[in-house]
Amino acid sequence: MPDPSNLSADVVVIGAGQAGLAVAYHLGRRGLASGRDLVVLDRGPGPGGAWQHRWSSLTLGGTHHLHDLPGMSDTGLSFTTAPGDRPAREVVSEYYGSYEERHGIDVLRPVTVTRVTRWGDGYRVDAATGSAVASVTARVVVSAAGTWTSPRVPFMPGRDLFRGLQTTTADYPGAAAFAGMRVAVVGGGTSALTFLDEVGDVAADVRWFTRRNPTFHDEEDELSPERGRVAVAIQDEAAREGRPLPSIVSVTGLPRSALVRRLESAGRLERLPMFAEMTETGVITREDQTIDLDAVIWATGFRPEVAHLRPLGVVNDAGGIVVEDGRVRGESGLFLAGYGPQASTISSNRAARVTAKAIAELLGR
């Protein structure tokens, strides 16, 4: 990161994943020069957002469809034709790197934003890179920090007593780490299904636990327009009321994909109700049955990363933020990108244009 002692800009974007890059692109189209008017900070060691940290066996062929960034066609690349058999973390990192270069988006990394405070008529963004501490002042802040660093692990009595391996989706080490083990996969989303599939090939036993009965819909990949609109509306309502955001899968259900059919054929899709507590050696079900385990994978989703915004007083006790059309209520210069109704890759792209327009108007451009 350059010497930050006098670093200032019109806009600071926190995060260079899908949402952050989309906003940076549209701001560039409106005349904000990256590195001068616009500063983009990212905690990752390289391009790719959270994708660069995902497990090596995950491919684009095994994930929900990843929509192209706005202007990605200018790079000659598209996720529609991207290789589906290579690790997704490699492909996305390469494509995002090409995108940043093609559109002149200078990303300062690795930089971890620690806090955002008010500064005059704008904001001060404090950050750390290695052992150095830096700060940037700006009229506008766009937080596109995502969720990857905030895995959601539900409260469970006895969880700290368990002597086996516990991991989250963000820390998943790959199936080989569970060879010969008795494993519980907890969660009702696509990641949980992926772990059931991968770990089931090498583990001695795998059990699937969820809080509610999963529902499946007939779309294999994409949500129907109606289902997608309902999901966005529910997320938008929660964001506008400052409530914690519901998980997407709790709204949309799971697609009856090739993965689901494979798990059904293998007899691995038998769901068990969430257990009541954990012990040193396993779990106890709500029927007082003891199940011995060697590992638990918490595939229970993520929370938005908003800790750096707490000094502003915009994060409530429940961890929610009141956000209307991407802007934090009461903060004319504070925007959240990829939050709530903008969480999907296609909605974050669409919202980025609206956010950039609002910022340009605020700056008088």
Image (spheres, rainbow, N blue to C red):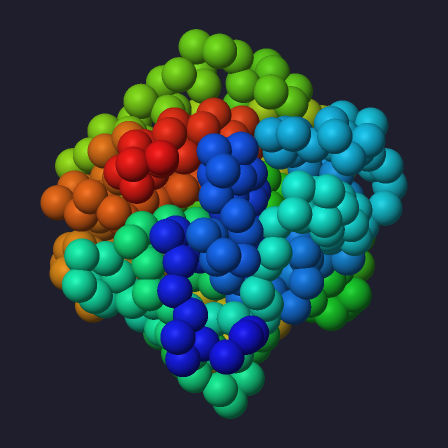
Residue 204 seen from this side: no
Q: Could you say which is closer to the camera, residue 344 or residue 152? A: 344
Image quarter of residue 95: top right
Task: Answer above or below: position of 17 versus 168.
Answer: above
Image quarter of residue 356: top left
Image location (x, y in percent) of residue 288: 37, 59
Q: Is residue 257 left or right of residue 16?
A: right
Q: Quadrant of the N terminus?
A: bottom right
* Residue occupying image coordinates x 54% and y 75%: 2
Image location (x, y in percent) of residue 240: 20, 34
Q: Could you say which is closer to the camera, residue 342 or residue 135? A: 135
Image location (x, y in percent) of residue 269: 62, 37
* Residue occupying image coordinates x 12% and y 45%: 330
Q: Is residue 95 left or right of residue 160?
A: right
* Residue occupying image coordinates x 49% and y 57%: 36
Q: Could you say which is closer to the camera, residue 92 or residue 167? A: 92
Q: Could you say which is closer to the camera, residue 99 or residue 84? A: 99
Query: What is the count of numbered marks?
Result: 0
Q: Quadrant of the C terminus?
A: top left
* Residue occupying image coordinates x 45% and y 19%: 228
Residue 353 seen from this side: yes
Image quarter of residue 353: top left
Image location (x, y in percent) of residue 361: 30, 32
Q: Is residue 321 left or right of residue 183?
A: left
Task: Answer above or below: position of 164 versus 107.
Answer: below
Task: Answer above or below: position of 115 versus 102.
Answer: below
Q: Is residue 255 left or right of residue 263?
A: left
